Amino acid sequence: MSRIVSRGAGVVSGMLGGAVAGVVFKQVWKLFAGTEEAPQATSDEYGWGEVLAAAAIQGAIFGVVKAAIDRSATRSVHRAIGG
């Protein structure tokens, strides 16, 4: 039973983490780059440097947010089910 609860919490926290990370990234990009949208890898408007910088920042933010949410969810599930 605890496995099912843990997996369900993992799915929900993953979706929540992705959504939160996307919002955080947009705000960080807007603050530092001064533009609404980050460069897309397939866009010809931006150079390699801009595209790779955006990808690196997005990846770092996603990783930190996901780890924080996963850790919090795991600890909450363990406390709730006594594991």
Image (tube, helix red, strand yellow):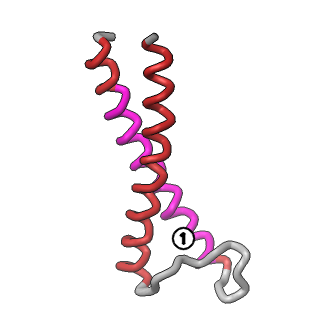
Q: Position of residue 43 (x, y in %)?
A: 70, 81
Q: Position of residue 4 (x, y in %)?
A: 49, 18
Task: Name the image quarter holding residue 49.
Answer: bottom right
Q: Is residue 58 above or below residue 5?
A: below
Q: Horizontally, is 72 left or right of 41 in the view?
A: left
Q: Position of residue 9 (x, y in %)?
A: 43, 30
Q: Position of residue 61 (x, y in %)?
A: 44, 57
Residue that label 1 marks:
54
Image: magenta residue range: 49-74
Q: Secondary structure at mark 1?
A: helix
Q: Is residue 81 above or below residue 21?
A: above
Tell me which residue sits at (46%, 10%) in the image: 1
Tell me which residue sits at (54%, 62%) in the image: 56
| Quadrant occupied by the C terminus | top left
Task: Give the number of marks.
Answer: 1
Task: Name the image quarter holding residue 31.
Answer: bottom left
Q: Horizontally, is 11 left or right of 71 in the view?
A: right
Q: Amino acid at mark 1?
A: Ala
